[in-house]
Image (cartoon, rainbow, N blue to C red):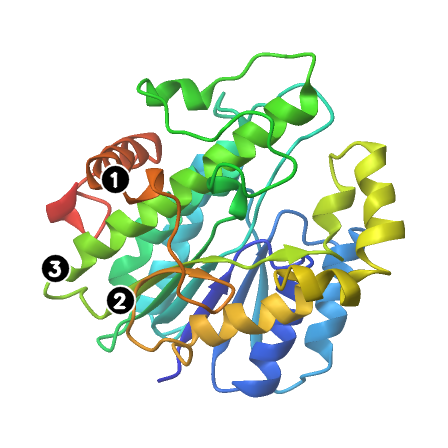
């Protein structure tokens, strides 16, 4: 089954090798690659364009999409749906929700929508994108790939200072105030966003399974591992973390991996993500993976009543209604 694969944050550390693997291994797919800045003045977009250029026969396009602007996400989804209806693009086969944001070294930032940026980019905008486009998958279905992190599981990540958790007042996740411990509070916002991604993904699968026309679409929520060469460790992070990456994590990765198999490169993770996106890995299956292994996610993430609360609130945040998603019966 070929079709269109959407990758958000397509100029990221994981995404560029993922795109390379997609174009090299599955050339029949059409790739729609979204980035915040499409100009080559952005060195990462330039790298993405250079990667694509190595596959002159590939069906690809780089599209501008700012996940910090919810209206832009809805407009993008409408445009993609229209292109599929008009047969300018093949039906969707997969959506890879790869784009991310964190801020570990300065005060909280807010989007044009007045929402704390971490939760909007990592979760809310991807909710809008996925739910708006479910009706654009082909009859064979397809795969939604959501990226979580070990940060969702209390005690699993060394940067954690505040345990992750979905608060009773979920709307408080949209807000943030400056704090002295910018690393601790910034990572807490990131971890909570990744917990929300995971719990929403579990709920998405339950709702898809109940819908006769959408039950062939499956969602995998993957923790891709500790990507020691990721640009994330050098973006919005304190200097010490950048030094640790340069002088410890990267040069000592082969040794560190003996103790912690999750220590790996972004390219390795990118291959896994594409194998999931095209439904070659775990075909037709759903749920959480750590790397490409079945492991239990955190106890908090498995609370079904909380998953449903996250589902309902996420649709509200993302401005999803019965009129703008094919999964209308679950909204």
Position of residue 120 measured from the top left corner of the image (x, y, whole percent): 48, 34
Q: Position of residue 36 (x, y in %)?
A: 63, 47
- Kindly identify the residue that appears in the image at 61 percent across and 87 percent down: 57
Q: Quadrant of residue 34?
A: bottom right
Task: Name the mark on residue 303.
Answer: 1
155 relative to 293 in the view: left or right = right
Around disc 3, counting alpha carbons within 10 Å, would you say few (fewer than 14), some (14 to 19), or many (20 or more)? some
| Mark 2 Cα-neighbour bin, 10 Å: few <14, some 14–19, many ≥20 | many
Name the residue tied to disc 3. 211
Task: Decide if residue 221 is in sight here.
Answer: yes
Q: Secondary structure at mark 1?
A: loop
Q: Which label's residue is closer to the chain start, 3 or 1? A: 3
Label whose residue precedes the other's in the sequence (1 or 2) = 2
Q: CA–CA distance between discs 2 and 3? A: 10 Å
The mark closer to the camera, 1 or 2, is: 1
Tag 2 residue = 217
Relative height, residue 135 to residue 101 (above, below): below
The number of callouts visible is: 3
């Amino acid at each position: 089954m070929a079709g269109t694969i959407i990758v958000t944050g397509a100029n990221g550390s994981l995404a560029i090798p993922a795109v390379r693997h997609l174009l090299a291994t599955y050339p029949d797919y059409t790739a729609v690659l979204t980035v915040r800045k499409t100009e080559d003045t952005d060195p990462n977009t330039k790298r993405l364009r250079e990667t694509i250029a190595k596959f002159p026969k590939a069906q690809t396009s780089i599209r501008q999409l700012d996940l910090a602007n919810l209206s832009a996400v809805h407009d993008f989804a409408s445009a993609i749906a229209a292109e599929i209806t008009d047969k300018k693009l093949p039906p969707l086969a997969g959506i890879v929700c790869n784009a991310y944001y964190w801020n570990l070294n300065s005060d909280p930032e807010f989007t044009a929508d007045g929402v704390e940026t971490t939760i909007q980019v990592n979760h809310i905008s991807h909710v809008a994108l996925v739910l708006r486009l479910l009706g654009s998958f082909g009859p064979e279905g397809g795969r939604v790939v959501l990226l979580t992190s070990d940060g969702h599981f209390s005690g699993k990540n060394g940067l954690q200072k505040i345990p992750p958790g979905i608060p009773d007042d979920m709307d408080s996740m949209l807000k943030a105030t400056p704090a002295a411990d910018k690393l601790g509070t910034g990572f807490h916002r990131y971890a909570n966003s990744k917990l929300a991604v995971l719990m929403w993904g579990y709920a998405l699968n339950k709702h898809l399974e109940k819908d006769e026309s959408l039950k062939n679409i499956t969602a995998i929520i993957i923790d891709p591992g500790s990507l020691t060469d990721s640009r994330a460790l050098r973006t919005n992070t304190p200097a010490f973390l950048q030094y640790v990456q340069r002088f410890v994590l990267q040069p000592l990765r082969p040794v560190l991996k003996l103790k912690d198999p999750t220590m790996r490169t972004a390219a390795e993770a990118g291959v896994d993500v594409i194998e999931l996106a095209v439904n070659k890995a775990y075909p037709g299956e759903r749920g959480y993976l750590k790397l490409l292994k079945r492991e239990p996610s955190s106890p908090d993430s498995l609370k079904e009543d909380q998953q449903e609360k996250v589902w309902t609130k996420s649709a509200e945040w993302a401005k999803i209604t019965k009129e703008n998603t094919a999964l209308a019966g679950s909204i």
